[in-house]
Amino acid sequence: QMEFLLVVIKSIIFTDFVFGGLLSNGFITAVIITEWAKSRSLASCEQLLLSLGVSNIFATFVLSLGFYDWNTKIIFSNTLTFLVYYSFSYIVFMRFWLTAWLCVFYCVKILNSTHSFFLWWRMRISWLVPRLILGSCVASFLASVIMILSDPKPFQSNGAANITNITKVGEMEELWKNGNIFFLIIGSTCPLLIVFFCSILVVASLCRHACKMTSKGSNLRNLQTEAHVKAARTVLSLLVLYWLTLAPNLISH
């Protein structure tokens, strides 16, 4: 009876995860694609949101397949295991980078800095976003390949697993360790630093704006302040969600 209850709970969680992910991300993706078809163009923010929505839909399918494999104890072939493992790694890294660029977009649009660096980004953000998305695809591909090459255990056959040469095993473990470090830097750490840096800038800008409005005796509930608050909440939420996603990977490595 306890096992049956556990199966029911897992099924409810799985169903909520799949349908919730598909419905929410599917709705966002459908709305953006519809607007794209009407206007024949996409704004920079919509390009990032569309990329995130599509990656989240694929992530839902891949995680569903992994969840099914984990609960049914079905042993997949090496080829299917490789595809699932690679797809999951690629999508995770892709979402990391897209989240980072979305934070950069909010930061560039919100900050009222006259620094040449921010002015350069603000003038070219529409030109940069498609290239940043393409660069995210390339970086995610490299990080995924490095991660898979650094951890070939899921794809080893029984014969390949029976290695008798201790020196060779030590060399392989050292290679795996170096690969994992490289994967953490390219796939996870760099996007995290970008998100963290943008979060600090947006919150600092909000604090400066609030202090300026207070000193002038103006009402803090104006449109510019509300825009700052919404952007700060969004960026901080992305930072928290990013860290919650990254923490298990850091612990496991």
Image (spheres, grey):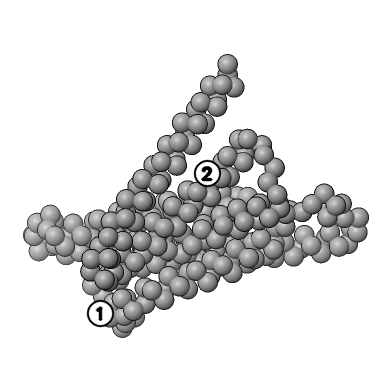
Give how far across and how far down residue 235 sits, in percent: 34, 58
| Position of the C terminus by quadrant | bottom right
Viewer-proximal residue among 38 and 102: 38
Residue hosting label 1: 114
State whether residue 126 appears in this view: yes
Viewer-proximal residue among 48 and 251: 48
Residue at 50% x, 69% y: name it.
137
Q: Is residue 74 above or below residue 82?
A: above
Residue at 32% x, 55% y: name it.
30
Query: In the picture provided, is 19 more to the left or to the right than 1?
Result: left
Query: In the picture provided, is 6 more to the left or to the right than 145?
Result: left
- Label 1–label 2 contact, CB within 8 A: no
The image quarter containing residue 228 is bottom left
In the rendering, which numbered label is found on residue 64? Answer: 2
Name the residue type under label 1. Answer: Thr
Query: In the picture provided, is 33 more to the left or to the right than 188?
Result: left
In the rendering, which numbered label is found on residue 104? Answer: none
Q: Residue lying furthest top in this view?
A: 1
- Secondary structure under tag 1 reads loop
Packing grade of label 2 (10 A; few <14, some 14-19, many >=20) is some
Name the residue type under label 2. Answer: Ser
Give how far across and how far down residue 149 sits, in percent: 69, 63
In space, the residues marked 1 and 2 are separated at their CA atoms by: 47 Å
Viewer-proximal residue among 59 and 147: 59
| Position of the N terminus by quadrant | top right
